[in-house]
Amino acid sequence: MTESLRIDRWLFFCRFFKTRSKATAAVTGGHVRLNGERTSPGVRVKVGDRIDVVRDRLQYSLEVLDIPKRRGPAPEAQACYVEDEEVIKLRVTQTEALRRDRLSMPTTDGRPDKRTRRKLIDRRRK
């Protein structure tokens, strides 16, 4: 394996983003931190580095274990990092809260009418 890899390629190879351009946009937009610092897409990732990613409003905290050679199957990608247990628990609770919030929203058969649209807007303001 190689010693280092660009952070945008590492995120793409480890399947955090579907395309490399989305990974590059996330790094450029400040959603990715390397060892606690905001970074640019060309910075090299080494074994032992700490990466914090915010994707879809969910937090991921990773430690780099290996540098992948390619974008392979998911088990191969998951072997390249280890995730912080506390962050996993926090993400699960956030996902459950979002799911509960979605279930409490008013539903309609198709496009919302005026009354339902007002309820949705009021719900978002809270």
Image (spheres, grey):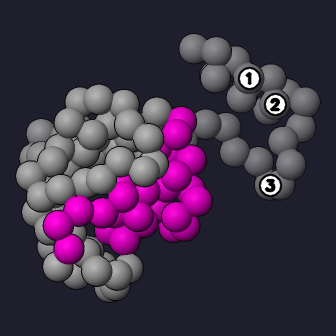
Q: Is residue 44 magenta?
A: no
Pick out the residue farthest to the top. Answer: 126
Mark 3 or mark 2, which is nearer the start of the sequence? 3
Tally of marks: 3
Q: Residue at x 45, y 48 (%)?
A: 41
Rendering quarter of residue 116: top right
Q: Which residue is mark 3?
A: 109
Q: Residues within 10 Å of mark 1 (few under 14, many from 20)?
A: few
Q: Position of residue 4 (x, y in %)?
A: 23, 62
Q: Is residue 111 left or right of residue 121?
A: right
Residue kind at label 1, given as amino acid type: Ile
Answer whether labels 3 and 1 touch (C-beta < 8 Å): no
Q: Is residue 70 left or right of residue 50?
A: right
Q: Is residue 116 left or right of residue 52?
A: right
Picture quarter with the C terminus: top right
Mark 1 or mark 3, which is nearer the start of the sequence? 3
Q: Which residue is mark 2?
A: 117
Q: Which residues are magenta?
A: 2-29
Checking the image for residue 36, the label placed there is none
Rendering quarter of residue 32: top left
Residue kind at label 3, given as amino acid type: Asp
Q: Residue at x 36, y 31 (%)?
A: 38
Of tags 3 and 1, the one toward the viewer is: 1
Checking the image for residue 121, the label placed there is 1
For the residues labelled 3 and 1, the Cα–Cα distance comes to: 18 Å
Q: Position of residue 94 (x, y in %)?
A: 34, 38
